[in-house]
């Protein structure tokens, strides 16, 4: 058992994972849950039924892995209006009690019925449950009753609690599941009033807000806490206030997790419970906090912005990226003392060009994040199960800590104000100043946008949210020319660090359109996008041409002032407006296969990213690629 | 212009495709629609806005391609309670009229409003539409008004027709969209009462039955006619009865089509309209049929069953497949006269082993379908745009026609009862008889199951349904160990030809679990699965072991007779029961990487496929692969 797990275990509250959360067979799932550091599991019956391991073997395996089996689930459609059906259900339960005894778990989940035989009579349900609890108790087993959000008659926790209270059997308690309760919009505050000893089990799941059938929503779109839209810290606060002392157990049905690497998903899952404990502790009284035994994390230090963005470039892409940076007004101000890395600067925006990363083309390799306490940031990342990256550094070079984000991007923690004593001291100044010509006027990095691997989109959102302490800003889906693209953005409160995550919802490995991949980009802020575009075009920047049709439509939709419209049309500047302000922005062409640069101007309180314009950008990038492909064919 | 297109065009009703149905840029979409043979397109505004082609250039391109532009769409949120908003909307419409004039299209789609400014006053809406129609008419343009299923106030075709009738302007008509009408459960029969000349446009889309928000359902899950669950031939019948003379136009928002090869999707789309015309013609009176000018297809001949299944085998898999067939009671009865193909037979089931297909491992290469008229079957397939495969045949060999299914499987049409004069005459008898030992008793091929490429699942269902004249049987989703699997089955009325199609809903190209691919299988029918399994095991068949846990759960769930349960447990036979009958079945291990065989027994009217058991089968196959992988590592 890893030391950290043992430490967490003695520290108080326990963690568990339903095997249904992960992909694979039961054997795969138990190994993954244990490796991530979970204290226990819920055994999901279909996983057990398909396993070649007997119940005794599963018990032994869990013991070897240092995990308890906290629950066997689900037992469906128990109560019945027909004595024959009820007798068959009791027989079925007896068979499952046999399994539980051999598994060495004492708790069975009973879901409220969806059967045509379901009772709409709480006293009779209570009576039937009381009898089943009696049979269970004879064998040292217990039952917890859960209201499914789509239960035929019993579908609220209030009603399930009434039934459990009426049944009044020590071997019968309640199971509360955040999804079933919050998906219906029920107020979870009432849970705090239920005696803690009758709360036998707690299942946690987050979910995005969706307008759809609650059964489908539950079966396909649940998420780990912090990845969706539910207020789970408030929910957990009520459960802990009630005096619940069982494990925090995740039950997440999710189509993506169902098919992605279970080892990765289990770490993501445990991270979600660590972050949730921190968030919940902040909302409890000191007394309740101490009693609950929630794990504590090093607090997230305040962030100061994007210290740098590191681009990996290869021999074929270096020239194009250098020319683009220069035409956008950057100067090559430094050369790393021991590595093939250049520093380019303009205002407070800094770009590292790393020719030694060994990656093809041009791509974003690392984000440098300014933090008021780099050591604390690193400790927090470690506590949240982020892989800390090994560093090779030369003598007298800055000791920068970095962790790996889910897509492999390195995240460096740079002490704000460390100046020459910090990472910039590793660079020998070139003495170069700003390029000739009118200034483009870039001031800082506005945001970085990273296309995520399909399996790790929600994991990435939770990583940035929890590790850096960012807040989810918004999510959207864009019907792009080559398929649906999902976006989520996270930022700190001040808007100094903004990160955009995107994923192609359905695009497969094999494309009908070769050469179209999901690009990444870095967006730089400036105070006047029209002037910046004019200066950059004059300097020969490879700016993306935007079709006239876009401006005709923009005129029809938003009617910007004619002179501004004419300038934007001339220069390829795009536009958006919302209730809070305006947004002007322009793009470069794709550089080195999967990277482009953007320059943005925010006016007023506009906090978006001009996503409405992204299909136009994608179609234009496609034309560029097609043109360069046909150019290659011509030569 | 291809000759067939010109022929279809003069034949009567015209076909059109909304550009939103396809993936890519406007340039890609127009090329794909024309290549498939569509007569016209609806230009979807976002496609045009993102295009570098001016309206004049788009018009010229469509003319070059021989296509008309039948509609420009959509114009949203026109009517307004606020004069300023209305004025802005009129200005916006004027800008779109400019575009339409240059595109050379005279019809604009006006959707019912979802805006906070929407009017809930039909007379005022009619008045505002009347005025806009007047502006349009001055420029020779027309408007068609469509009730969105989620329109804020106007969301039924009845209400939209009331408004159009009240507005009473010759340049204003109705657009009817099958999705908006059928998704709400409205009765489309009333359309037949609307004067045909006021039906300005018809948009067709199918969809699966789903319990979800209608907007999301519409935006993501629409299908081409014949791929979903709507009764579109009845719908179209009402529209034609009304006297509609415009094109049959497809407007299908679908996440998969949005990212798959547009050339393929456009052919699939046109096939759907051909099949729909046939189905609709069957429901119209002869008079109405003649007036409508629907295209006719060669009728589907009656099918006689699976004549053969051809397996492609390579050097590494041949032995395993031969041993499995032999142990299942097949005899090698023939050798092809000119090709490296063996014929194996048992009862009426025939398997060809083709060692010359050049495919790795073992897989299903072809289906031989018995038909009462092979020539008519081939003509029908061709008329439905199926690629007819070139054949190389030796002297005096049977002239078998084959077409390619969407996944590349060849479908051969074999004349029922042709006997030695047919394809079997190409094989030299070996003189071999049934193997020794107790008979397995296989009688015929029960079904063939083909895992489909992700992009072509719905296309495949329509292909088999239309080309072979099969009927959709059922669809399901299975939460399998490595991710969600979607199934659809099609069969002829007699159940002689059954084909199962499956697709991994989200699994990506790169797997965390190497070696797990979606397998195909052939299922053979027998009258006694327990006896068959006993005989096959005795003969050394590589049957799949099923875990004890499965039988314990089966006992708890369905309580089969203890003696049967014991036998099934001993032999690895699985079981299912429904209201119509029972199903017993067993599987071989995976042979040659992606193929397995199944033996099934149907009792009573059971028409399913034991899908509930498939996760158990998948987990067992995974163990077999893991074991053979570690065996390889050990040696």
Image (cartoon, coloured by chain):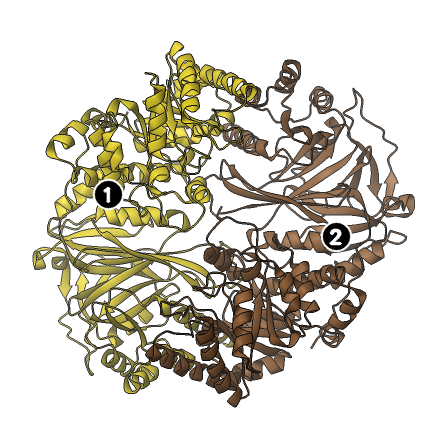
Chain colours: A brown, B yellow
Disc 1 target residue = B388
- Say above or below: A493 vs A60: above
Q: From the viewer's perspective, tell me whether residue A605 is left or right of residue A158.
A: right
What percent of the width, then of the height, locates residue B485? Answer: 41, 59
What percent of the width, then of the height, locates residue B611? Answer: 34, 66
Comparing marks 2 and 1, which lies closer to the viewer?
2
Q: From the viewer's perspective, tell me whether residue B424 is left or right of residue B508.
A: left
| Number of other residues with Cα within 10 Å of mark 2, as a class: few under 14, some 14 to 19, many 20 or more | many
Q: Is residue B68 visible?
A: no
Q: Does dot 1 land on a helix, a strand or a loop?
A: loop
Q: Quadrant of residue A175?
A: bottom right
Q: Observer-nearest residue: A450 or A211? A: A211
Q: Observer-nearest residue: A429 or A577? A: A577
| Number of other residues with Cα within 10 Å of mark 1, as a class: few under 14, some 14 to 19, many 20 or more | some
The residue located at (44%, 81%) in the rendering is: A93
Disc 2 target residue = A468
Q: Quadrant of residue A354?
A: top right
> To which chain does the residue with label 1 belong?
B
């Amino acid at each position: 058992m890893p030391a950290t797990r043992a430490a967490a275990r003695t520290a108080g509250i326990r963690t568990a994972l339903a095997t249904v959360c992960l992909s694979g067979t039961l054997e795969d799932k138990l190994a993954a849950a244990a490796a991530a550091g979970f204290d226990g599991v819920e055994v999901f019956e279909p996983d057990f039924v398909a396993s070649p391991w007997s119940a005794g073997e599963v018990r032994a395996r869990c013991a070897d892995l240092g995990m308890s089996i906290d629950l066997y689930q689900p037992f469906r459609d128990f109560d019945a209006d027909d004595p024959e059906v009820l007798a068959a259900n009791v027989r079925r339960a007896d068979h499952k009690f046999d399994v539980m005894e051999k598994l060495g778990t004492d708790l069975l989940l009973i879901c409220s019925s969806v059967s045509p035989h379901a009772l709409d009579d709480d006293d009779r349900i209570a009576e039937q449950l009381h009898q089943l609890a009696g049979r269970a108790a004879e064998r040292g087993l217990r039952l917890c009753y859960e209201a499914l959000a789509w239960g035929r008659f019993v579908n609220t926790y209030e009603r399930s609690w009434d039934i459990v209270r009426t049944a009044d059997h020590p071997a019968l308690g309640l199971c509360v599941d955040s999804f079933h309760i919050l998906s219906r919009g029920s107020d979870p505050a009432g849970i705090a009033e239920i005696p803690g000893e009758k709360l036998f089990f707690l299942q946690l799941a987050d979910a995005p807000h969706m307008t759809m059938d609650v059964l489908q929503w539950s079966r396909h779109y649940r998420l780990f806490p912090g990845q969706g839209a539910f207020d789970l810290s408030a929910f957990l606060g009520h459960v802990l206030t009630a005096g619940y002392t069982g494990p925090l157990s995740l039950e997440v049905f999710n189509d993506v997790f169902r098919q992605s690497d279970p080892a990765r998903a289990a770490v993501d899952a445990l991270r979600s419970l660590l972050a949730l404990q921190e968030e919940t502790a902040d909302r409890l009284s000191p007394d309740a906090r101490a009693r609950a035994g929630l794990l504590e994390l090093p607090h997230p230090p305040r962030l100061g912005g994007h210290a740098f963005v590191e681009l990996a470039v290869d021999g074929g892409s270096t020239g194009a990226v250098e020319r683009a940076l220069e035409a956008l007004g950057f100067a090559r101000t430094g050369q790393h003392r021991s590595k093939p890395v250049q520093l380019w600067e303009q205002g407070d925006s800094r770009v590292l060009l790393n020719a030694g990363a060994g990656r093809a083309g041009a791509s974003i390799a690392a984000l440098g994040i300014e933090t008021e306490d780099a050591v604390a940031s690193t400790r927090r990342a470690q506590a949240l199960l982020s892989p800390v990256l090994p560093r090779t550094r030369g003598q007298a070079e800055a000791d920068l800590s970095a962790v790996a984000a889910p897509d492999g991007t390195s995240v460096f923690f740079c002490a704000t104000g460390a100046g020459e004593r910090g990472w910039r001291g590793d660079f020998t100044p070139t003495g170069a100043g700003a390029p000739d010509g009118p200034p483009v006027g870039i001031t800082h990095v506005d945001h970085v946008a990273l296309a995520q691997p399909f399996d790790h989109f929600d994991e990435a959102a939770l990583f940035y949210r929890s590790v850096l302490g960012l807040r989810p800003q918004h999510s959207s889906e864009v019907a792009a020319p080559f398929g649906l693209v999902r976006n989520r953005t996270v930022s700190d409160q001040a808007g100094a660090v903004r990160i955009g995550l995107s994923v192609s919802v359905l695009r497969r490995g094999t494309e009908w359109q070769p050469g179209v991949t999901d690009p990444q980009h870095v967006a730089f802020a400036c105070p006047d996008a029209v002037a910046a575009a004019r200066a950059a075009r004059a300097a020969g920047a490879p700016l993306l041409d935007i079709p006239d049709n876009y401006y005709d439509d923009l005129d029809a939709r938003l009617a910007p002032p004619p002179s501004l419209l004419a300038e934007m049309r001339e220069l390829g500047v795009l536009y958006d407006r919302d209730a809070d302000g305006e947004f002007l922005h322009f793009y470069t062409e794709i550089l080195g296969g999967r990277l482009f640069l953007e320059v943005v101007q925010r006016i007023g309180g506009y906090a978006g990213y001009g996503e409405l314009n992204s299909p136009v950008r994608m179609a234009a990038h496609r034309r560029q690629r097609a043109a360069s492909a046909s150019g290659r064919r011509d030569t």
